[in-house]
Image: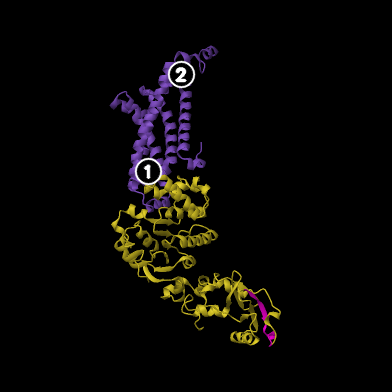
Chain colours: A yellow, B purple
Amino acid sequence: MTTSTPAIRLRGVTKRFPGSAQDAVSDLDLDVEQGSIVVLIGPSGCGKTTTLRMINRLIELTSGTIEIEGEDVTGLPTTQLRRGIGYVIQQVGLFPHRTIEANIATVPRTLGWDKARIRARVEELVDVVGIDREMLTRYPDELSGGQQQRIGVARALAADPPVLLMDEPFGAVDPIVRTRLQDELLELQSRVHKTIVLVTHDLDEAIKIADKIVLLNVGGVVEQYASPDQLLREPASAFVASFIGEDRSMRRLNLATVADLPYHQGPVVHLDASSAEARAAMEDEGSEWLGLTDGERFLGWVDGIEVVDGRHLGDLDRFLPAAQVRPDSSLRGAMEVILNSRTTVAVIDDDGRFGGTVTLERIRRALAAPSADTNGDGRGA
Amino acid sequence: MLLATRAANPLIRWSYFTEQWDRIQEALLQHIQLTLLAVAAGFVISAGLAFLGLRYRWSIGPITLFAATLYTIPSVAFFGVLVNYLGLGLLTALIPLTAFTILILVTNIMDGFNAVPAPVREAADGMGLTPSQRLFTVEIPIAVPYMINGLRIATVTTVGLVTVAAIIGYGGLGRLILDGLRRTFWTPLTIGASLSILLALLFDLLFYALGVWLTPWAKRKQTL
């Protein structure tokens, strides 16, 4: 995909556990781009956790090579290797006998940072993960599950490693907290740009946070390595199709945003447009209603019948409010708005500015098109 | 007559404290010494056995069986038999006392290490702690409350057992008790027994305090 060296590179990676007749992971090749989130997912026994743990050598590979930023992981002592890789696990594994501050400081301390530097870094990190500094003197038992998980992330980021490995990091918290932690991870990632490899069994989570998804089958066989949208749009095999399930188009609605749709003016004209222009706009769209703008804001809908020559459009009765969506809302959100409104059109509103319109038909076409993010203007099937 | 005997032989005659203070003091110090030596030796041996058991899981069965067998030996017989080989000496008193602590200590130490949650170990490894860093900064601290518990039980038991060693002349306060029994003179017996009980309670309290001090993070879990 890119010309730069992948941050993590797996070649022919194979793991066979002693006493097992089959490979847990078999001849796996994988490139993880710098600064991207790659999610490993698949049924149990697919070797996703084994693969993750081979990267920091908690499990030693049987054959093959793993490189991090061009360096073979077997070239370093394991302790040194792991101090350069952030590691977050489902059960967090905070040290119960250490304060939050000491927990976060684990790796910097091991690396011999001075006290002032550690203190500054710890305070920076709790701010980043949204934990109150007063919590620093508490013990892990005194924190909620969500807070513990945030501290786990802070601890993993402490020495600013370029790579972060996360093994079902949000699997042990309730769904509301999980959603929030996912949002926070994405927010965090937009600032820190780590290379993240994350294991999950939750497809929605994978779709939400991954730049690319690796769908593994039993024995560590890659069924598909693709962006979430591509995975949902073009499952590479029957296995992939069945894994992602029947509602893949619905899932894609969650993935794409209104801004991904091609810009569409809709039956909307400027207040000062002529009646001929207004009629043309309605005709193009097959609409009986006309929207008006003042060049900036959307002003409201007028009945097409009232558009007659010689009458200024601004004098017509306007109907408000219009159904509105924001450019960053998901297509699913936009559909919801349209289905709940009396018009079949939602107005895209970006902080008061008119940005175009969305219709159910436009959404349907976008999903049917080869790619929702590049060419949504394709014809419907 | 009976009344007169009672009056002459009360449960405690307070003057005994002043008259025999040297004797009481000597007995008390010996009692403390025997207890601490036995528990300390027992702890060192048990730590070694626990390490073995945790390292080689198959050895847990034999180790436990060995410790339990030691524990089943009647104490009087244990002291008595050893006299034949080692004579009347400190070592003869210490060996059984130490042996009786091992079952309690070894199981508690192993429990402590087994109480380290697997994710905590995994996180420690995943962050690149060396095995000895993991042992000293993570596993031992987490095992401390269990070790303290073992030490509390072992110490209290040993304080009681030391009195039995009086039969070979090394019983600390037990010698006062034995003396009282032989002479049907209640005062030394009462004093010996009471001080022994107080000593056990005191040790227990000290270890409890040590535990609280060492494990501020687990204070809510500690119980008196």
Magenta region, residue range: A297-309
Image location of residue A270, percent across then percent down: 62, 80
Q: Is residue B162 above or below residue A78?
A: above
Q: Is residue A224 above or below residue A378?
A: above
Query: In this rendering, would A66 be left or right of B159?
Result: left
Dot 1 falls on which chain?
A: B
So how many labels did they put on this image?
A: 2
Numbered disc in front, either 2 or 1: 1
Residue A20 placement: quadrant: bottom left
Identify the residue at horizontal 35%, vertical 60% (top origin): A55
**Residue wearing tag 2:** B188
Mark 2–mark 1 Cα distance, whole angstroms, equals 47 Å
Q: Is residue B13 above or below residue B90?
A: above
Image location of residue B219, percent across then percent down: 50, 40
Query: In this rendering, would A43 be left or right of B91?
Result: right
Residue A306 part of the magenta-drawn span? yes
**Residue wearing tag 1:** B136
